[in-house]
Every structure is written in structure tokens, then in C-alpha cells.
Image (cartoon, helix red, strand yellow):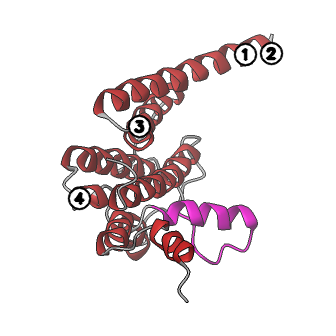
């Protein structure tokens, strides 16, 4: 079975699962884990969008 | 005469118990299992879902699995990353999956997904060890 993901969908899936692991492993209590996981997810996605716009600007 | 300072230093070193060896080993073989055998069920299940899904999606995207005798330094680094996935990596090698498809641009993403899944499992293994020695709750 072959899966074809777009660039953005791949980035979202990557950010989601990586953030879950980072949240669990880098913080002590549940609340901090959730907060850190959400923070990582936002940084991953924000970084992706920023990098996309940066490439768009460079290309012009 | 015994040196009391030396004894204190030995006591202060990381305590070696059965769980400190078992949890990382089981956690490497099955992602999240190191947490589950220490009764951190939810964390263990979330780690298992996250790492296994990332690895399987990488395979489904026609990602390439690295083997031990890569030769090239980047292949060796890829192998180390892939190896972190433990049982998933062993099953993939045994079934001869993960041959990679150059035809798809996203196949390279698949390769990276599998490497990252392995690296994330290394972090999960270290976390399971920290729980086992009491450094983390």
C-alpha cells in the first residue's frame, strides 16, 4: 500500500507525533507535558509556514 | 580503614536495579513498553502510537530503510537512526520492506519519518530509564 502525502500534510503529521513524544519526555507533570507538546506543535507548524513564505520571497 | 567519603560517592551514583536495565531494553524493542511496564500506561500508549505511526507512515510513503553495511557515513547515521525503532526496524528488515522508491518525491519524507521515529524512540528509552532510576516521576 502506497501513501502519497503532500508537503504540508507530511509536515503536519510529523509535527503532531514528534510534539507528542517531546511533550511526554521533556516535562515532569501532565499539565506541563500538554503545554510543551502544544508549544512544540505550534513552533513546528509556524516554522514550516515561515520557511514556506521565506522560500516564496527568495524565489521572486 | 574504610573511607566513608568513597562509600557515599558510590551510594550517590545511579542506583542499579532490575527495572533500570529492563525498561530501556523493552522500550527499545517495543516503543512505549518501557513506560508501560512501569505502569505509565497513558504515556506508553501515546509513545507507541506516535512512534509506530510515524515509522509505518514512512514505510507506506515508500521510504528507504538503512542497513548496517552502508559504507557511506550518511548511510551509517541513517542506520543508527533507523535502528532506534527496535522491533519495528527488525520486522522491516526481516520482511525486506523499505526498499525505497525514487519515483516519488515524498518517498524521501518517508525515509526521514522512519529515521526520526527511531531517534524519538531513543529519547523515549532514555525517559523510561530516568523513570526507572527515580529521576523522573
In magenta, the rendered stretch is B65-84
Viewer-side residue, A9 vs B115: B115
Q: Is residue A4 visible?
A: no
Check if mark 1's residue and mark 2's residue have beta carbons within 8 Å: yes
Q: Quadrant of residue A22?
A: top left
**Among the two numbered marks 2 and 3 on one chain, the one whose residue lies closer to the N terminus:** 3
Q: Mark 4 falls within which chain?
A: B
Q: Where is mark 4, residue-wise?
A: B38
Name the mark nearer the viewer: 1 or 3. Answer: 3
Neighbours of disc 2 within 10 Å: few (<14), some (14-19), many (20+)? few
Q: Where is mark 1, residue-wise?
A: A54
Mark 1 vs mark 2, CA separation in Å: 6 Å
Name the mark nearer the viewer: 2 or 3. Answer: 3
Q: Mark 3 falls within which chain?
A: A
| B23 left or right, relative to A7 | left
Determine whether A19 is above or below A42 in the image. Answer: below
Instruction: For mark 2, give the secondary structure.
Output: helix
| B33 left or right, relative to A20 | left
Q: Which mark is residue A27?
A: 3
Mark 1 vs mark 3, CA separation in Å: 32 Å
**Among the two numbered marks 1 and 3 on one chain, the one whose residue lies closer to the N terminus:** 3
Amino acid at each position: 500500500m502506497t501513501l502519497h502525502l503532500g508537503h504540508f500534510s507530511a509536515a503536519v503529521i510529523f509535527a503532531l507525533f514528534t510534539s507528542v513524544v517531546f511533550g511526554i519526555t521533556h516535562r515532569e507533570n501532565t499539565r506541563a507535558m500538554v503545554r510543551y507538546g502544544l508549544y512544540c506543535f505550534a513552533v513546528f507548524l509556524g516554522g514550516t509556514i515561515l520557511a514556506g513564505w521565506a522560500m516564496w520571497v527568495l524565489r521572486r | 580503614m574504610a573511607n566513608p567519603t568513597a562509600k557515599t560517592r558510590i551510594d550517590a551514583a545511579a542506583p542499579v536495579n532490575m527495572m533500570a536495565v529492563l525498561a530501556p531494553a523493552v522500550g527499545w524493542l517495543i516503543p512505549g513498553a518501557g513506560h508501560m511496564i512501569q505502569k505509565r500506561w497513558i504515556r506508553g500508549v501515546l509513545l507507541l502510537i506516535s512512534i509506530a505511526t510515524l515509522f509505518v507512515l514512512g514505510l507506506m510513503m515508500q521510504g528507504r530503510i538503512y542497513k548496517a553495511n552502508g559504507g557511506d557515513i550518511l548511510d551509517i547515521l541513517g542506520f543508527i537512526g533507523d535502528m532506534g525503532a527496535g522491533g519495528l526496524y527488525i520486522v522491516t528488515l526481516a520482511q525486506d520492506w523499505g526498499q525505497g522508491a525514487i519515483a516519488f518525491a515524498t518517498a524521501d519524507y518517508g525515509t526521514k519519518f522512519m529515521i526520526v521515529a527511531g531517534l524519538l524512540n531513543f529519547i523515549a528509552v532514555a525517559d523510561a530509564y530516568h523513570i526507572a532510576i527515580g529521576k523522573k516521576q
